[in-house]
Image (cartoon, rainbow, N blue to C red):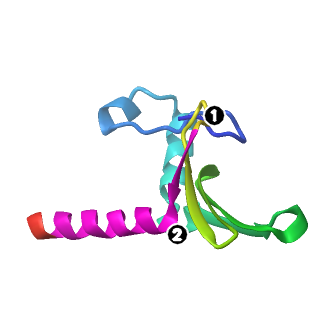
Amino acid sequence: MVSHESKEPIIELDIAQKACLPLDKIIKWLEKAKKTLLECFRIITYNSPGEKDRIAEVYFDNFKFCEIYINNNKKMLKFFTYPNKQNWKFDLDFVMYNFERSKNRFLDIY
């Protein structure tokens, strides 16, 4: 995955791979790992020009991974992929319902 801001790859390596990295890369990875999940999330909300749409952009570790927007009382969720920045649009209520269903199924199994 590549950051849309810095164009640097995210380092996701196992311990064996880390041992082969230069010290500065290991230090950078350790500093990044110190962040808590909460510190990695950032949400920006705004109204579009003309005040027709309300939008919330959701970032995780500087990657915009989804956008929630309301237009004429229609709530939508848009997921982004990287590096090509394609997106998938879904009805927000549909997504939330299916997330809840999936979570409950998972918890029932485990």
Q: Is residue 57 left or right of residue 51?
A: left
Is residue 50 something that shows in the picture? Answer: yes
Q: Against 37, is 31 above or below?
A: above
Residue found at the very far front of the displayed protein: 72
Residue depicted at 27% across the width and 67% down the height: 101
Q: Against 93, is 23 above or below?
A: above
Residue found at the very far left of the displayed protein: 109
Task: Give whichever of discs 1 and 2 has the lower sequence position.
Answer: 1
Any mark on residue 38, and which? 2
Query: Magenta region: which residues?
Result: 87-107
Query: Which residue is denoted by mark 1 in the rendering?
Result: 8
Q: Position of residue 95 (x, y in %)?
A: 42, 62
Residue depicted at 19% across the width and 63% down the height: 106
Q: Secondary structure at mark 2?
A: helix
Q: Is residue 47 left or right of residue 20?
A: right
Q: Amino acid at mark 2?
A: Leu
Q: Position of residue 98 (x, y in %)?
A: 33, 63
Residue 93 is one of the magenta-drawn residues: yes
Q: Secondary structure at mark 1?
A: loop
Q: Against 6, is 44 above or below?
A: below
Disc 1 to disc 2, C-alpha distance: 22 Å
Q: Is residue 79 left or right of residue 70?
A: left
Residue depicted at 57% across the width and 61% down the height: 76
Q: Residues within 10 Å of mark 1 (few under 14, many from 20)?
A: few
| Quadrant in the picture for residue 28 | top right
| Of residues 2 and 56, the one drawn nearer to the viewer in this rendering | 56
Q: Amino acid at mark 1?
A: Glu
Residue 17 is one of the magenta-drawn residues: no
Residue depicted at 41% across the width and 68% down the height: 96
Residue found at the very far top of the displayed protein: 20
**Quadrant position of the C terminus in the picture:** bottom left
Is residue 36 something that shows in the picture? Answer: no
